[in-house]
Image (cartoon, rainbow, N blue to C red):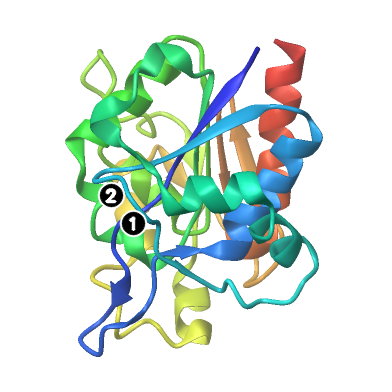
Amino acid sequence: MHNILILVTNQGTLGEAKEKNGTYAPELTHALHQFMDANIAFDIASIDGGAAPLYGDDVDDGVNLEVLGDETVKTALANTSPLSDIKPEDYSAVFYPGGFGLLYDLAKSEAAGSVSAAIFENGGVIGAVCHGPAGLLPVTLSTGDNIMAHITVTGFTHEEEKDFGTIEKIPYLLEESLTRVAGQYSKKAPWVEFIVEQGKVITGQNPQSATAVAKAMVAQLTQA
């Protein structure tokens, strides 16, 4: 029986204007849709626990509204488990949905990084999409290396930040951060679905890539 740990941010605002932010809902919901279809259990956790701030929860794409309307999902998002309650041995995968919020907390959390490292080193799958790969920045393995040190990853690009109008609002540029840490950073044209699967680490470039990341995670888990 597989169980996926989904790590979401507690940060609900972006930039000096304190715009509504958090986890970008479609990246979470499209992944959850795949996990639920495959009958894979999941828990949603954050550093502090409690209600998860979301934006994009009004995006009308069918899947987004359907999943956000699911009672199990609504309860999980309203009551995320605090990271201190999470036992890595209970999980066979970790998924980081994107959204700008995690640039402020999960991307800097050694505690979250330790949980993901433990799951990964126990044979678990790690998935992240859009800004989600920022959550891998504090994931240090027992070798002392970052989880991305010797592999290729992708994530939200400089060009996409410019297109989205957030280049002046974000605390740092994800593409640059990943390029400095990963063995290699790879990207395609803006807004094109693109994932990189390197062993048990699967990353996606943008919101359009959430479903593909989740499908790749499900494929690995169901083949295990």
Q: In which quarter of the image is the C terminus?
A: top right
Q: Quadrant of the N terminus?
A: top right
**Residue depicted at 20% across the width and 47% down the height:** 108
Mark positioned earlier in the residue sequence (1 or 2):
1
Residue 173, position as x, y percentages in the image: 32, 67
Instruction: Kindly state the secondary structure of the residue where label 2 is placed.
Output: helix
Residue that carries the numbered disc 2 in the rendered image: 107
Instruction: Kindly state the secondary structure of the residue where label 1 is placed.
Output: helix
Tell me the distance, in whole angstroms, between the alpha carbons under discs 1 and 2.
6 Å
Q: Relative to 128, does residue 126 appear above or below in the rendering? A: above
User: Is the residue under label 2 in contact with that under label 1 (CB below 8 Å)?
Assistant: yes
- Residue 81 showing in the rendered view: yes
Q: Relative to 13, does residue 137 appear above or below in the rendering? A: above
Residue 131, by quadrant, is bottom left
Report whether 15 appears left or right of 134.
left
Report whether 156 appears left or right of 214.
left
In the rendered structure, which amino acid carries the disc numbered 2? Ala
Residue 74, position as x, y percentages in the image: 57, 53
